Amino acid sequence: MVPRAYPGVPLSGLVASLLILLVGAFSDLGPPPPAGELLDGTVIAVERDSSGQPMMALVQVDTGSGPAICGIDRTAFAGQRLPAPHTELTVDYQPVGCALPPVSRQLPRWVILTFGGVGAALMALWLRVGR
């Protein structure tokens, strides 16, 4: 036999789970807009500091006004590992410089929907069994 809980607990859990489902269904989870223009670029060289450690990738980007070269610091790359020369990548190009394209740091939509759905199902089951 399932012990009876205060009725507000499962009801508030059900409402919270349904709200999580709504947030997952209707929220915009895409990455933030780029600061400039997303263009294809090619790593043409890797610059090293005075001790010989790689510090920056030089990227050539074909813009509307012709080719441009910009640098992206190694801290912008995953694991601070610079890509090898001739590697193609997409960059967020601005006339004053370039960066890697913005990435969404939010939970994926399927995680939010799964969390809300499982929570709603468990709370509905609790309300049904507890009667």
Image (tube, rainbow, N blue to C red):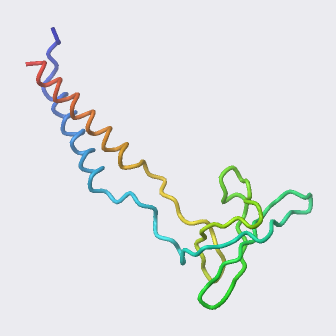
In the picture, the quarter occupied by the N terminus is: top left
Q: How many marks?
A: 0
The quadrant in which residue 3 appears is top left
Residue in the foreground of this view, choosing between 13 and 80: 80
Residue at x-position 80% and y-position 69%: 45
Considering every residue shown, the one lying at the far left of the view is 131
Residue 84 to residue 69: above or below: above
Q: Residue furthest bottom?
A: 65
What quarter of the picture does the C terminus occupy?
top left
| Furthest residue in direction top, as rendered | 1
Task: Give x and y (percent) for residue 39.
Answer: 58, 75
Q: Is residue 72 above or below residue 7?
A: below
Could you tell me residue 107's position as x and y percent?
42, 48
Residue 86 placement (x, y as % from top left): 74, 67
Residue 101 location, x and y as percent? Answer: 56, 66
Please indicate whether residue 72 sits to the left or right of residue 21 in the image. right
| Relative horizontal placement of residue 62, taking residue 69 as reference (left or right) | left
Q: Is residue 123 above or below residue 95?
A: above
Residue at coordinates 60% horizontally, 79% vertically from top-left? 94
Q: Quadrant of residue 100?
A: bottom right
Which residue is drawn at the image coordinates 62% and 84% (left, top)? Answer: 63
Say whether residue 16 is left or right of residue 28.
left
Decide: is 15 above or below 39.
above
